[in-house]
Amino acid sequence: MSSAMYERMRANPKFQELVTRRGRYAWTLAFIVLSMFYGFVMVVAFNPVALGQPVSEGSMWTVGVVVELFMFVFFWVLTALYVRRANSEFDALTQEIVKEAWKENK
């Protein structure tokens, strides 16, 4: 593709919409992940006793292990949500932008 075609794609209002929506979604998910991860690290640093408590009486599982397993699964779910939205909504919008740029190129 030529640089003129890239410029047409960048000038397309749909491109700006794509960048805005994808960026907002990615930053939202990143904020969630970083907040949870660093929140967990802060609890480990400043209140490790809370994470060392058993989940229930006589349980071998501690609160820290359960929270970390939850976070592991939750982060995979967030990744799957991003991939699903990227493969449907974001890719569809990208294809529209490319098609419009090709039409203008001819």
Image (tube, helix red, strand yellow):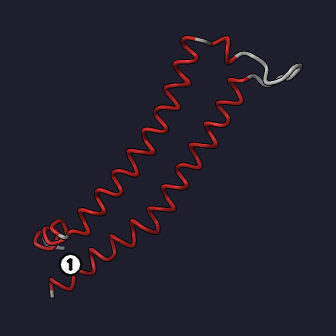
x and y percent of residue 99 in the render? 27, 81
Relative side of 83 to 101, left or right: right
Residue lying furthest right in this view? Answer: 58
Q: In which quarter of the image is the C terminus?
A: bottom left
Query: Hey, which quadrant is residue 63 in on the image?
Result: top right
Residue flagged by tag 1: what amino acid is it?
A: Ala
Q: Quadrant of the N terminus?
A: bottom left
Residue lying furthest bottom in this view? Answer: 106
Q: What residue is drawn where x is 45% and y is 45%?
A: 29
Q: What residue is drawn where x is 67% and y is 35%?
A: 69
Q: Nearer the viewer, residue 56 or 76?
A: 56
Q: Is residue 35 above or below residue 94?
A: above
Give SS at disc 1: helix
Query: Hey, which quadrant is residue 58 in on the image?
Result: top right
x and y percent of residue 33 in the render? 49, 38
Q: What residue is drawn where x is 53% and y is 55%?
A: 81
Query: Which residue matches tag 1?
Result: 101
x and y percent of residue 48 in the render? 63, 13
Q: Is residue 68 above or below residue 47?
A: below
Q: What residue is drawn where x is 52% and y is 50%?
A: 79
Relative side of 97 to 68, left or right: left
x and y percent of residue 35 in the render? 47, 31
